[in-house]
């Protein structure tokens, strides 16, 4: 441990075992990182000890020259203070949620005849603004919906200047506008419609519909039949709009749904915001490897460490998100996975909202459907940004969940055995990187350890040789060689192949995910198997298509090698029938002439020029093919 870390560790040991916030500083006093702790001493000491292995934090620690701290009364207070300080200082090593989208606002103008508009910026012009919203399309739809339901004008006419200057347009005849231009609505009634439309936008469709229905029933009871009819028309307009739009959430009026998706060195943090039972807004944040510590852990950490890192990152992302947006909080926050301190987050959000905010992990039913929708959107955003197909990313994520892997397998190796009745035994190894074939990394194996038919022994020999080559090449840096271990190994076959290979991996000290690919009677992929049983594959799943592609490619590659080897063996055996031609000369002839047809057609002078040949053996070859009538 260097002198700087030793000094920082000695300082950290003196910290109290109390909740608080710590600030890591560089040589110039600038703040590098702000964190919270339930017990300051235990948390800060970790950074400067020998056992802290988070590569991201270590990169930050190397720049730390001092730290400060603030003691507070509880972990909840530490979270509140941490968020406030991060918002104030924006430290380099805290996760920053940034995107490249502009915001949109709903603008209600302040004039005699107010208008509802979509605005790109908020100005100090006396108008009322609702927002901000990140989804411009959703804002546009919401405003159009309110204009249609409450019969507000969408044209460019200016009121009161243009009142009485022309006939009402088609919108009036379609019952979508009250037509102030044609004096079809009084100013007071128009202003009331604008107020009701604004309230509708603030509360969302579900609450707005409830209030409209209650107002209609009350008007009918009060014998205000004209007003009741007007409210009835608004409800009918809303019903027609609902027929065109799918209601996405029935269970909770206001909720935010989050999903975190990773691929290669990037991640996407996605949120779908529901209000009034329908999707109203969506945001996504792209995180690079430098921002997202869990990605760094994927290289070296085991499953428990990776799971804990994901929980920690998800917690921190939620804290950063709601620190930026501390108003308009939902009643429920729905997540795609666990977080580090659920109760703490609920207390913090509840304190800001002034009511209870539930934080839940989706398990089944509608919550799971909404999370899957959010995850699919995250995959699309990430695929668009990385230039990869979202179906491929989705298939890898789905395969990881199906097999219980801690992360999507970025590097997959698949093996298949091929032979003819136990002769010419070969194996093919295919590689899929990020869900796509990496043909430069394909490998072929000729079975050498025995003769005869034994698929289990063949598979064990191939993996034994592959793991031995890894030990030889692991430090070479060859990306297409044997120097990289896969994230997942798939074997063509069932439990027998898996049981044959498991001891090989244990002997070499590798705990790699190992599964077999099982085919049905029609030679189609039907399941994945491990030592514990089979996992059925549904044909509608993206993972099924990926595994089928991998298995078919492994089979094709192994069959092609076997066919080539078998053909060469047959040709060798025919040449060996010629007097004076042994294995070495047969090989030399095939290498020199490339094909048997060329050897058959060659004259003795040309045959004699092949390595190891002379005039006598060349004449013997010529005479053999003449006597067997195979020369043309």
Image (cartoon, rainbow, N blue to C red):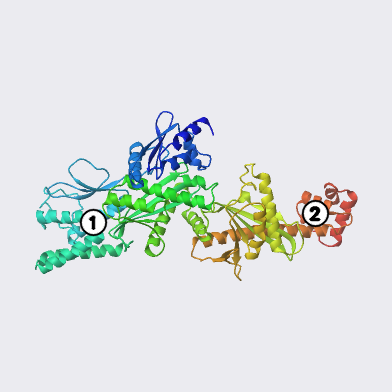
Mark number displayed over residue 203: 1
Q: Of all residues shown, which one is farthest toward the right?
A: 616
Residue 167 is at least partly visible in this image: no
Residue toward you, 428 or 251: 251
Q: Position of residue 174 (x, y in %)?
A: 20, 62
Q: CA distance from mark 1 to mark 2?
A: 87 Å
Crowd around label 1: few <14 · some 14–19 · many ≥20 (10 Å): some
Q: Position of residue 124 (x, y in %)?
A: 20, 40
Instruction: Indicate the quadrant where residue 152 lies.
Output: bottom left
Q: Earlier in the sequence, mark 1 or mark 2?
A: 1
Q: Position of residue 249 (x, y in %)?
A: 33, 61
Residue 607 is at least partly visible in this image: yes
Mark number displayed over residue 599: 2
Q: Of all residues shown, which one is farthest toward the top?
A: 28
Q: Taking 432 as reference, is 170 left or right?
A: left
Residue toward you, 612 or 418: 418
Crowd around label 2: few <14 · some 14–19 · many ≥20 (10 Å): many
Number of the front mark, 1 or 2? 1
What is the count of numbered marks? 2
Residue at image point 61% right, 50% down:
485
Local SS, label 1 = helix
Q: Is residue 256 above or below residue 51?
A: below
Residue at image point 13% right, 66% down:
218
Q: Taking 562 as reference, is 608 left or right?
A: right
Residue toward you, 186 or 289: 289
Q: Taking 126 as reference, is 575 left or right?
A: right
Residue at image point 45% right, 45% down:
292
Q: Position of residue 545 (x, y in %)?
A: 53, 61
Local SS, label 2 = helix
Q: Is residue 499 above or below residue 308?
A: below
């Amino acid at each position: 441990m260097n002198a700087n870390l030793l000094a920082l560790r000695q300082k950290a040991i003196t910290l109290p075992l109390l909740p608080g916030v710590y600030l890591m500083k560089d040589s110039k006093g600038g703040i590098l990182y702000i964190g919270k702790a339930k017990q300051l001493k235990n948390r800060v000491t970790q950074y400067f000890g020998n056992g802290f292995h988070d590569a991201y934090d270590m990169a930050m620690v190397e720049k730390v020259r001092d730290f400060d701290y603030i003691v507070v009364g509880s972990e909840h207070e530490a979270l509140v203070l941490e968020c406030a300080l991060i918002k104030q200082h924006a430290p380099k090593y805290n996760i920053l949620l940034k995107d490249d989208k502009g915001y949109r606002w709903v603008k209600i103008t302040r004039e005699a005849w107010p208008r509802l508009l979509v605005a790109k910026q908020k100005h100090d012009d006396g108008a009322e603004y609702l927002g901000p919203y990140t989804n411009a399309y959703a804002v546009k739809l919401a405003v159009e919906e309110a204009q249609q339901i409450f019969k507000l004008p969408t044209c460019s006419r200016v009121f009161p200047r243009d009142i009485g200057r022309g006939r009402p347009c088609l919108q009036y005849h379609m019952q979508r506008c009250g037509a102030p231009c044609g004096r079809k609505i009084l100013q007071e009634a128009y202003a009331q419609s604008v107020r009701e439309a604004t309230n509708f936008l603030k509360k969302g469709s579900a609450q707005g519909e409830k209030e409209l229905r209650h107002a209609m029933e009350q008007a009918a009871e009060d014998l205000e039949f004209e007003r009741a009819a007007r409210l009835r028309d608004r409800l009918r307009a809303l019903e027609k709009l609902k027929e065109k739009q799918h209601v996405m959430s029935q269970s909770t009026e206001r909720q935010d749904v989050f999903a975190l998706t990773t691929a290669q060195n990037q991640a996407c943090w996605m949120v779908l915001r529901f209000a009034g039972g329908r999707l109203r807004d969506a945001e996504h944040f792209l995180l690079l490897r430098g921002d997202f510590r869990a990605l760094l852990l994927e290289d070296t950490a085991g499953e428990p460490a990776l799971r804990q890192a994901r929980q920690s990152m998800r917690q921190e992302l939620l804290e950063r998100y709601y620190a930026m947006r501390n108003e308009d909080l939902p009643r429920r926050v729905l997540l795609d996975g666990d977080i580090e301190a659920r109760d703490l987050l609920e207390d913090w959000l509840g304190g800001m909202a002034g009511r209870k905010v539930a934080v839940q992990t989706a398990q089944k039913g509608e919550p799971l459907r909404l999370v899957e929708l959010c995850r699919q959107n995250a995959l699309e955003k990430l695929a668009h940004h990385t230039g990869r197909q979202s179906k491929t990313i989705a298939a890898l994520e789905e395969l990881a969940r199906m097999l219980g892997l801690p992360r999507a397998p970025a590097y997959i190796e698949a093996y298949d055995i091929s032979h003819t009745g136990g002769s010419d035994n070969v194996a093919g190894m295919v590689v899929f990187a990020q869900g796509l074939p990496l043909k430069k990394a394909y490998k072929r194996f000729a079975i050498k350890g025995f003769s005869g038919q034994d698929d289990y022994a063949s598979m064990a020999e191939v993996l034994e040789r592959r793991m031995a080559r890894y030990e030889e090449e692991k430090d070479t840096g060859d990306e297409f060689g044997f120097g990289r271990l896969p994230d997942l190994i798939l074997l063509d076959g069932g439990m027998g192949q898996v049981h044959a290979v498991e001891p090989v991996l244990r002997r070499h000290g590798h705990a790699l995910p190992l599964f077999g690919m099982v085919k049905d009677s029609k030679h189609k992929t039907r399941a994945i198997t491990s030592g514990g049983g089979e996992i059925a594959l549904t044909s509608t799943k993206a993972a099924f298509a990926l595994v089928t592609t991998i298995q078919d490619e492994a089979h094709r590659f192994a069959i092609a090698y076997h066919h080539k080897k078998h053909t060469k063996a047959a040709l060798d055996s025919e040449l060996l029938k010629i007097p004076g031609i042994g294995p070495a000369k047969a090989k030399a002839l095939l290498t020199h002439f490339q094909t048997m047809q060329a050897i058959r057609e060659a004259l003795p002078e040309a045959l004699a020029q092949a390595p190891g040949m002379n005039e006598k053996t060349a004449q013997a070859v010529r005479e053999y093919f003449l006597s067997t009538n195979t020369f043309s």
